[in-house]
Amino acid sequence: MLKKIESHDKTLFLTFDDGPDSDYTPAVLDVLACYGVPATFFCIGSQVEKHPGVVREIRELGHTVGNHTWSHPYLTKVTEAELIDEIVRTATAIENILGLRPKLMRPPYGDVNGNVLKLVWDLGCHVVMWDVDSVDWSGIKGPRIVSNVIPYLQSGSILLHHSAGQAFGTPEALPYIIETARKMGYCFASISEHIGVQVYE
């Protein structure tokens, strides 16, 4: 289970959960393109099915697509069969669009235990968590999101943001986060380039 990436060169890793959608995900993609910053999008399967074009755009713009389950349940509260279905169904939906089956997986709410981790591992997936939480899912505005992120940055930090739901402050906050982090000497990179494992099969 990965919460932070070993790094000695002030590298940060942006991640976005709960998309894709037709509003905030494209807005986030526009900001990332403007600044030339890569990210990982942990997508919900039911949303993937609704917005296949956005999934393609995420990949075409050079970002990584990961698995965030089909319906966003607490994985410690579902049966083993339900957990497997949540992950496999989402992986298949993404594969049907991209021709690639994601191996990076983020549990909704970060809700895991030993059994969940074993089942995810047995499915050939790698769990990616985070160490900096923007709390943008709560509907807070851009300045508050920035203040939840900037003071807590460390080399190798994995930043948790959202690109759907109540994350309307995220597209506003991102430019400030990126610009401020860069002024502090940080750079942004893709998780896929720094963890030494295949992110698709």
Image (cartoon, grey):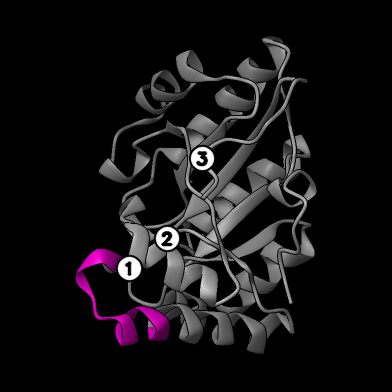
Q: Nearer the viewer, residue 109 or 50?
A: 109
Q: Secondary structure at mark 1?
A: loop
Q: Which residues, given as a range, are shown in magenta? A: 74-85
Give the answer, above or below, for where 199 lies relative to 176.
below
Name the residue that disc number 1 marks. Answer: 72
Q: Is residue 17 magenta?
A: no
How far is mark 2 from mark 3, CA to CA?
18 Å
Amino acid at the residue labelled 1:
His
Q: Which mark is residue 51?
A: none
When asked about the image quadrant of residue 107, the answer is bottom left
Name the residue that disc number 2 marks. Answer: 18
Name the residue that disc number 3 marks. Answer: 3
Category of crowding for the residue at label 1, using alpha-carbon neighbours closer than 10 angstroms: few (below 14), some (14–19), many (at least 20): some
With 21 as the anchor, is 37 left or right in this view? right
What residue lies at 53% left-to-right and 57% top-to-bottom? 25
Discs 1, 2 touching: Cβ within 8 Å: yes
Earlier-in-chain disc, 1 versus 2: 2
